[in-house]
Image (cartoon, rainbow, N blue to C red):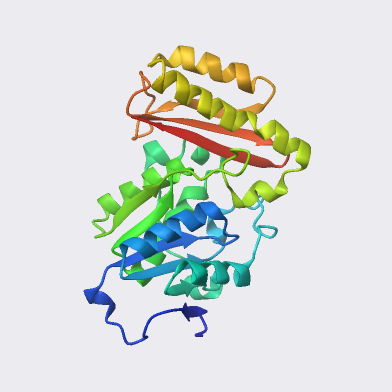
Amino acid sequence: MSHAKLHNENKDSNIHFTSLDIGFTPTMGALHNGHKSLIESNVAQNHIAVVSIFVNPTQFSPTEDLSTYPRTLERDIEMCKEAGVDIVFAPTSEILYTDDDEITIEPPRKMGYILEGYYRPTHFRGVLQVVLKLFNLISPTRAYFGQKDAQQLLIIKKMVQHLCLPIEIIGMPIVRDYDNLALSSRNVYLSESERQLALAIPKTIFHLQDLITQQNIRDIAILKQEAEKILENLNIDYMDFYNHDLTFATKAQNCIFLLVVRIGKIRLLDNLWIE
């Protein structure tokens, strides 16, 4: 194990990476079955599967939960090993951030400072900074991200396109828990009563999905009214239909319904990708 905590789990260390497809799943650890689905696709589709585990400080604001974010490194490494991951890259902040005057990368103005970027104005700057560093270190053929963080996924795709990075970005569907709540490492912060309140979120998602796919209702005003009925007792940060460039959609077709609700101390994200 090097000073960067590089775990080569299954393959010969003399592999010539450049001749093989490298899959990469960047994570902040506290792995759950949502991460596992990304990792399993990574393992299945590439010669070499790499997972990073790094709680990135630059994407947290001073008031957010950097110090208390769940950290379960040994359990995470075991999950990766069982899934067939070849390399777990678990650097320290000192490895990735070597200077107190770091070069940063700004998110796109029209996509990066609305929605999550409005509530967390430094967030995507930190995300893009660390993802670009990791891409340069790993040189992946493919990289796997969850669709639950839809805005992040769309912005990373844009970065890859605009910076001419030879990487295929693959978005993977949301994985849900036994009660249909979208899996998140922060769900551990919910009390039992808060979790019961949070179930209105997936209820809304599935109701809209049925209205769209079964009844072919594409009128956004009608769909938002239906969502508001279910969510009326919750604190909504934002809820609307967006095109893939994050402009407002005028019809529920080829777009994404984005929903963020505050419950207790956390913000819960969910969405519906609509064809």
Residue visible at 38% across and 48% down? Answer: 171
Image position of 110 (left or right of 72): left
Q: How many discs mark residues in the rendered view?
A: 0
> Which residue reaches farthest bottom?
14
How far across and down, in percent of the image, does residue 185 sit? Answer: 61, 52
The residue nearer to you, when weighing 150 against 20, is 20
The residue nearer to you, when weighing 99 against 79, is 79
Note whether 168 is above or below 18 in the view shown. Answer: above
Image position of 9 (left or right of 196): left
Residue visible at 47% across and 73% down? Answer: 89
Note whether 83 is above or below 191 in the view shown. Answer: below
Image position of 94 (left or right of 107): right
Note whether 57 is above or below 98 in the view shown. Answer: above
How far across and down, in percent of the image, does residue 30 sit? Answer: 60, 60
Residue visible at 43% across and 60% down? Answer: 40
Residue visible at 45% across and 18% down? Answer: 211
Note whether 223 is above or below 76 in the view shown. Answer: above
Residue 125 appears in the rendering:
yes
